[in-house]
Every structure is written in structure tokens, then in C-alpha cells.
Image (tube, helix red, strand yellow):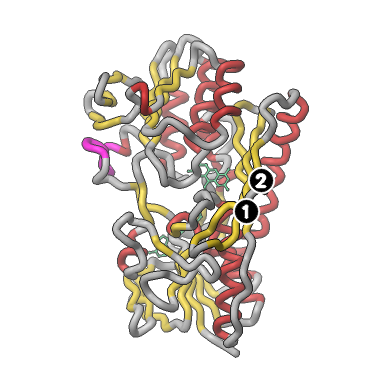
Amino acid sequence: AGGRVVVIGGGFGGSTAARVLHRAGLEVTLVEPAETYYACPFSNEVIAGLRPMSAQAFGYEGLRASGVTIAQTRAEAVDGAARTVRLADGRTLDYDRLILSPGIALRFDALPGYDAAAAEVMPHAWKAGAQTELLARQLAALPEGGTVVLSVPGNPYRCPPGPYERASLIAHYLKTRKPRSKLIVLDAKDTFSKQKLFEQAWKALYPGTLEYVPLAAGGQVTSVDSGAMSVATDFETYKADLACIIPPQRAAPIASAAGVADRSGWCPIDPVTFESRLVPRIHVVGDAAIAGAMPKSAFSANAQAKVCADAVIDLLAGRAPATPKLINTCYSLVAPGYGISVAGVYHPDKGVLADVEGAGGTSPVDAPDPVRRQEATYAEDWYRTITSAVFG
Ligand code: FAD
């Protein structure tokens, strides 16, 4: 059976879904305003001067060449009852099923002093592009002996290990280029992804350069002042020469416009089909979705988009979708040639995506150097493979 599907967002989730649906012979339109997509994975290497920004840029020629119709404009509104999407270019698209993968919005109302203007002084660089380049320039211009402050939010947020990879690579930059400088990491929580592995690496590689302050030691940032270049916790005010503030996040605005975000700011979904719990015939994948135990990663967005697109194909054909199993792997670099990873397997259980007991795990804590080097290579290979599958 036919069926019109609209996909909003041409990132890791949306581009994947559009490809799968098109391959199955469905009429699909991908709505994405940007001409170039800047990928976040490996953008921490750009910040540390280890990689050019061009390695993060992907166009949509590949998707177009494979036959996917792209509306190069923004989706402004969704009418879930009439099943229409209003586009910024004035058009309206009808759909039988709608898939949203719009990613995140930075919450500029969550941390006193941190708004869009402050982000131009104290970058978040949590969406790749101009912000990544700004932070890279600031780091390159940091005076020797300067202090860098990195603020990490509480859960949930895009890419759980990302802030700690960033801390590691900034510390690597300081150690090798400006050895009298210091990085202070202020965290709003006490435990984090791959914590043992990160802490072990920091102890071995960056003593005296990287200072980590967890919640219990007063790490939660309560306000920032971009004029005074200061970052405050309940206990102390830190003066910074460079401040990277990763604020709390929520699903991108189109999710609330479509009525699929709940009061948490994220989108509750059915774990088999990724259909919204709030509006029928709208599905949400990727960072915007509440995917239970699955972390918000490009790997997850890609895996969820495949499952969701297959479910949409089944639903439009009047078939019951199969119960899925999903996988995620997140690599992090703690230094060039030093990679670590965490992997998980997930399945629908009691209405949510839950860990499959006994599956997955992290890199061994006591692995020898060659294993770390190999994992750094796997990370590179993963990036090449996923970006060519999604955008190539
Ligand atoms: P996105 O990739 O953000 O795509 C959303 C798209 O939707 C965007 O192109 C946007 O323009 C578009 N959009 C938004 N609103 C609209 C609208 N109204 N109309 C039309 N289009 C719209 N993940 C990993 O798996 N491995 C890693 O190593 C890794 N490293 C990371 C490092 C950093 C520093 C960061 C910040 C993230 C990292 N991630 C990593 C996470 C990964 O980038 C995200 O999880 C992933 O991009 C999520 O995909 P998505 O499709 O949900 O959203």
C-alpha cells in the first residue's frame, strides 16, 4: 500500500528514516532548512585543533541522488488532526505518517545569565557549526597559563559522554600547547558515562591540568556572567579566561509546536513503533525522543530511525510491526590514539526501551595501550561508515 510520509529534520535520525522509506517505495519528503549538515561526533577534535571543520560537513547531494525528495526549508507548524505540516516557504504538506527527528534546543531559560547572547561569549558548541569554530578559535587564542571552565548539565542531554571527551581533548591541547594552563570541569551530577575509564585516563594523562568537580563537591553551576567572565556555583565563583557552558536541553521547538513534547520538554514514545504517546500518526526518533535506557547519540538516532521507518512501512501496509532490538555504541577519545567505548542492547519492556540484561558493557579498565589505539581506530571507522550510510 502507498502512503505519504513527511520526515522533519535531516540529521542522523531523519536522513536515515527518509532513505529507508524511499527504498521501500513510499512517497517521502524530507524537510531540512540547512544546505550543509555539521556532524557533532568528532567535533571535540575540531575544538582541540586535531581535525578540520570540513571533516564534519555533509551536503544533501547524496540523499537527493538516491531519489529522496528534500524540501529545503523549515517546518513551522504541524496540525496533528488535519495531518498537515506547514513549511516556512508557504507550502503545506499532507501526511499519512509524520516522523520527527529535529534534535535538541539549548535551554536559554534554565541557567541565570546564559542566553543566546551569552553563548556568543561562552560557547556551548553543543550543536556543531559556528559554535564549534568559535570555541576552537577561543581555545587557540587562550593565553598560556589561562583558566578554562567547562560546565556540564544534569541528565538527560545530548551525548552523555560528550562533555568528558571534550574535557579530555581540551586538557590534551593545554598539556601539549599551553602547559601552565588549567581546565576546571564543573558537573551538575556525581556519576557519568564511562566514568572509571575517563577518571583513569585523566589521572594518567592530565594530572595538574584537569580538575574535576562533581555535584557533591559543589560542581553544579548556578549562574554565569558573560561580561565578567565568571561562572558561579553555590560555593564558589570561578573566573575564566575561556568558558564553555553546556546548558540543559530539550527537544527542538517543532516538537512542542506539534504537541508531542511533554512537560519535561522531551517526547514520550511507544518503544516498538516510536509513535508519539501524545499525538497519533506522529513518530519521534533521535535526541528529541524519550527512549528509556538508550542514550541520545547519533548511533541511537540511526538505529531508532531504521526501526521506526520499518514500523511505519508495516503500519501503512496494515501489518503489525515486529518487536525490535536496538544497539548503541559510543566511542570517546581521551587523547589522540586513545579510545574508549560503551555499548548497550535495548528492547521494549513494560512500555519503555530497557537494557537487555547482560548485554553490552564498556572497554576494559585495565586494557593495554594497543587496545586503546585500536578503539581510536574503530571510532574513526565508525564515523566514516555511519556518515557515508546516512549522507553518502
Ligand atoms: P540532529 O542530528 O541534531 O538533526 C536534527 C536536524 O533537524 C538538524 O539538521 C536541524 O536543522 C533539523 N531541524 C530542526 N528543527 C527543524 C524544523 N523545524 N524543520 C526542519 N528541520 C528541522 N553521537 C554518537 O553516536 N557518537 C559520538 O561520538 C557523538 N559525539 C558527540 C559529540 C558532541 C560534542 C555532541 C554535541 C554530540 C555528539 N553525539 C555523538 C550526539 C549526536 O550528535 C546526536 O545524538 C545526533 O546528532 C542526534 O541526531 P538527531 O537526528 O536526533 O538530531
Asked whether mark 1 lies closer than 8 Å to ligand 1, one says no
Label 2 packing within 10 angstroms: few (<14), some (14-19), many (20+): some
Q: Secondary structure at mark 1?
A: loop
**Dividing the image into 4 quarters, which one contains the C terminus?**
bottom right
The disc labelled 2 sits on which kind of residue?
Answer: Gly
Predominant SS of the magenta segment: loop
Asked whether mark 2 lies closer than 8 Å to ligand 1, one says no
Q: Is residue 375 above or below residue 7?
A: above
Evaluate if marks 1 and 2 touch, with contact meaning CB atoms under 8 Å apart: yes
Percent coordinates x, y for residue 155 in the rendering: 41, 43
Q: What stretch of residues is rendered in magenta? A: 111-118
Tell me, yes or no, if residue 191 can be seen here.
Answer: yes
Residue 356: numbered disc:
1
Residue positioned most to the bottom: 1
Label 1 packing within 10 angstroms: few (<14), some (14-19), many (20+): some
Residue 16, by quadrant, is: bottom right
Residue at 36% from the left image edge and 25% from the top image edge: 216
Query: Image check: 107 left or right of 64?
Result: left
Residue 360: numbered disc:
2
The disc labelled 1 sits on which kind of residue?
Answer: Val
Q: Secondary structure at mark 2?
A: loop
Residue at 24% from the left image edge and 32% from the top image edge: 223
